[in-house]
Image (cartoon, rainbow, N blue to C red):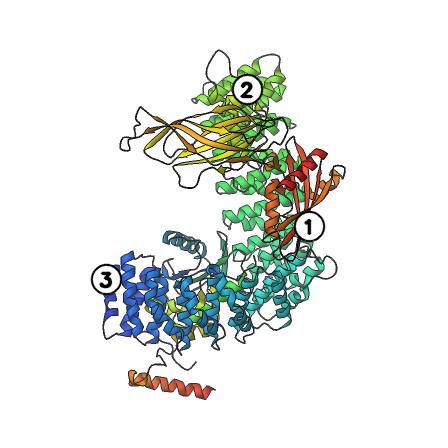
Amino acid sequence: MAQPFLKKDDDHDDEVDYSPFLGIEKGAVLQEARVFNDPQLDPRRCSQVITKLLYLLNQGETFTKVEATEVFFAVTKLFQSRDLGLRRMVYVIIKELSPSADEVIIVTSSLMKDMTSKTDMYRANAIRVLCQITDGTLLTQIERYLKQAIVDKNPVVASAALVSGIHLLQTNPEIVKRWSNEVQEAVQSRAALVQFHALALLHQIRQNDRLAVNKLVSSLTRGSVRSPLAQCLLIRYTSQVTRESASNTQTGDRPFYDFLEGCLRHKAEMVIFEAARAITELNGVTSRELTPAITVLQLFLSSTKPVLRFAAVRTLNKVAMTHPIAVTNCNIDMESLISDQNRSIATLAITTLLKTGNESSVDRLMKQITTFMSDIADEFKIVVIEAIRSLCLKFPLKHRSLMNFLSNILREEGGFEYKKAIVDSIVILIRDIPEAKESGLLHLCEFIEDCEFTYLSTQILHFLGIEGPKTSDPSKYIRYIYNRVHLENATVRAGAVSTLAKFGAMVDSLKPRIFVLLRRCLFDTDDEVRDRATLYLKTLGADGAVEDMKEFLFGSLDIPLVNLERSLKNYEPSEESFDINSVPKEVKIQPLAEKKAPGKKPTGLGGPPPAPPSTIDAYEKLLSSIPEFANFGKLFKSSAPVELTEAETEYAVNVVKHIFDGHVVFQYNCTNTIPEQLLENVTVIVDASEAEEFAEVASKPLRSLPYDSPGQTFVAFEKPEGVPAVGKFSNMLRFIVKEVDPSTGEAEDDGVEDEYQLEELEVVAADYMLKVGVSNFRNAWESMGPDCERVDEYDLGPRENLAEAVNAVINLLGMQPCEGTEVVPSNSRSHTCLLSGVYIGNVKVLVRLQFGIDGPKDVAMKLAVRSEDEAVSDAIHEIVASG
Amino acid sequence: MESCPSIKNILLLDSEGNRVAVKYYSDEWPNNSAKEAFEKSLFTKTQKTNARTEAEIAMFESHIIVYKFVQDLHFSVTGAENENELILVTVLQGFFDAVGLLLRGTVDKKEALENLDLILLCLDEIVDGGIILETDANVIAGKVASHNIDAAAPLSEQTISQALATAREHLARSLLK
């Protein structure tokens, strides 16, 4: 380029550590910004001040609303200057200040003028600024210019308009969608980046129209796309189309595979890689399809560029999970990557090798890993440990060297998570590989001799107590365990005492010696340790009923701890002693609010993985605590809360319908939103005259409902057993209201009785259906057999689209959609939806819905029901017929 | 969803991890302290690596980060975990080379701060709201440094030297055609 790039003066060359922003201060800069108001603008000085303002913003300084507004208004004055450099800075700072709507108006006209300027740079930047700060109303005014800009012959202008279009599509889709013709034209542009931006925008405009995307992809894969970035986009869109059409073309060649393979020979590395990655991610990719992609990735492995190596090894690592054989060709290249400077690359290489390696290479690999482990971070080490664990389970014969490796790294320095990963792995290996048990247990024993983590020590002691007595020579573990009693903190000591007792209980020959050790523990400084020792001495010392004792002391507690805790809290000291058998045994999990960490790792020391949580437990817990409802039996289903009041009313009430076999309980969740009121004796008067089969049996009022702390009142109805009775209920909230002095928070003594009308509530057929999925619908359907099948056709009348019709039927039936069939591909004309559920009386029900849409949006449906009971199949049809 | 490649942030830090110029395009970092925390952890993770001849790559907190150092400056570009690494590195290289051109080869913190306006314009020309605008360093630098005279302005408003520069440019253009 002939012209020199703009550069500032070099006055300060000899000063060391000079920063032009040294000692910069917001207040002073804001003062300086007054030069923007000078009648004779000095462009260079103004640019410098803007740079200072931007510097402050960039360093995380914030302007108050007033300051920002002031600067913004001053900046708008600068549109008077024709200095291009200054104008560029003005554009940037306007974007940074992100002005409010009323401020935007000030600059709109200046920007619109720039948008139609002859200078390309003005047009491009004004478009970007205006589109970023504008709202929908202005957009219609400038739409014409934007459409023109999209097909502008200057690529910078066209790109600016297209990129702005991509952003605006999120907020004003209906406007941007009108530009398709221009965008389509821009896709054919000779300028590389314009093509890229146009393709991105066109695809986003059409993404819900599968046919159009398909057409777009087919035409472009044949033509020539110039920009590598656009080519990458095209590869992404192509694999999307391939994925969606995969179900239709099981036979023959995969559409567009040739295109993807052709891209592997593209001259740009990013395109080659994008294509290779797309091929490896194809659904059910065959090894023949994989080969060319693996070959190019293999070449990348020996590149001098770390980024290429990383990209390749990361992709191959993923492939190795599903197609280990296909990756074995790269093993030699992979092995050289173990010593890669970049530890991410090295870790990925090792874990890939662990997945693809065969039995004979394990020893060699382990040797290499040992040197490698010492200089990588804990997080990488954990990845390696997990890979080694699965390798060991794959090649059990190699357990000796792998176990040795694990025990060696266990002795080295490391954080808790890392140590836990190792211990978990050893525990799993001990469980799954019987030959590894003895050596594994000894490794763990040695580890607790010098373990700084109380949690790990106690877990290992517990595990030793279970596995140790079953080994050939249990006595050799005693020393390790008893050492803990001497050397550790109270928690570990208590754990050690329990473990000792377990050995005593399980191994008769050790019993006398264990007794000696336990007696010494009676003088421990800690209560828990002494108590445990006393308990074990007493129970194990007693003659007879040893089996019961063992069960009592060491058997797994088949009662969920939460239930036990609750029962103990409810227990009032009396003549009657606490009976553990009275604790409910149903597995109850915490309500949904408590999020579980994604439990993808195999549980090592912990118990079995927890069952999926459900809200029903919380309700069941609540209901079982109310004596009036205790004899209703097992809770069949609880509905989602139904609002009975409008939002923002004085009292907010919603209801949850609890369905039992012969009863229904309404749980009214009430919230008092008036600070000056205290409600007492809150009940809901339910009129069930439109629900003939229901008879009220109990009502549990809410004693007091202070401001903003929700409470519940319940009403229970009896209904014919096992019958899905439906009906309408009207509700009236009745209560005594007392005035509260807001300053003291004290309520007056006298209250007034008052009522508050709530909305109606319905019990519908879906309330009797439990959403229970099946993993393989086809199998379940076949095994159910056609004996109790009922098939009929229904006309659902005009509907907005298929998806809406499908949702309506799913909601009506209240069943669980299976295999993702609740999702209707856009623009499809027919759809099959599979549902499964359990109907009241514990009858399994499977439903196959076939929908078809007719020209004027008329939806027809074929409903096939299979269940274990004809009557239930008929009932489902009745629900649909009446719904 | 198959989407357009997107950039989460572009950072230019100094050799102590302090900001020279940064630009965030993703709202994953809601406030300045979140941004600073990210920069700090990025800096500690990468500072020991030798990313001077070739761009290096790291993966943490479910981001892919490509970075390159020169003198006392650390350039980096962050993208999503599943982003094509080579696209990210193309953006990084574009930024890196464009800064090199704009600073006429003397790329260090002092020079960068003295020409911060050019660096900021450069960032503005590379990515718009996360979408890649341009990756060719010559084009980026050209757009940033292009003739700072408004060609549409009447000649009378220009100084003599500006007029000469404009004339020279017109001549150069006509010769190039």
Q: Position of residue A762 (x, y in %)?
A: 54, 35
What's the amino acid at mark 3?
Answer: Ala
Q: Are marks 1 and 2 on the same chain?
A: yes
Q: Secondary structure at mark 1?
A: loop
- Going by the image, does A386 lie left or right of A454? right
Task: For marks 3 and 2, give the CA distance.
Answer: 75 Å
Task: For marks 3 and 1, give the CA distance.
Answer: 70 Å
Q: Secondary structure at mark 2?
A: helix
Q: Chain of mark 3?
A: A
Tell me if mark 3 has few (under 14), some (14-19) or many (20+) residues whose alpha carbon lies within 10 angstroms of its own: few
Tell me if mark 1 has few (under 14), some (14-19) or many (20+) residues whose alpha carbon lies within 10 angstroms of its own: few
Give the vertical position of A298 relative to A654 (above or below).
Answer: below
Q: Chain of mark 2?
A: A
Residue for badge 2: A580
Q: Chain of mark 1?
A: A
Residue for badge 1: A358
Residue for badge 3: A28
Do the residues bearing badges 1 and 2 touch, measured as CB atoms within 8 Å?
A: no
- Going by the image, does A14 lie left or right of B171? left
Picture disc at residue B172: none
- Is any atom of residue A13 visible in this view? no
Q: Position of residue A774 (x, y in %)?
A: 66, 40
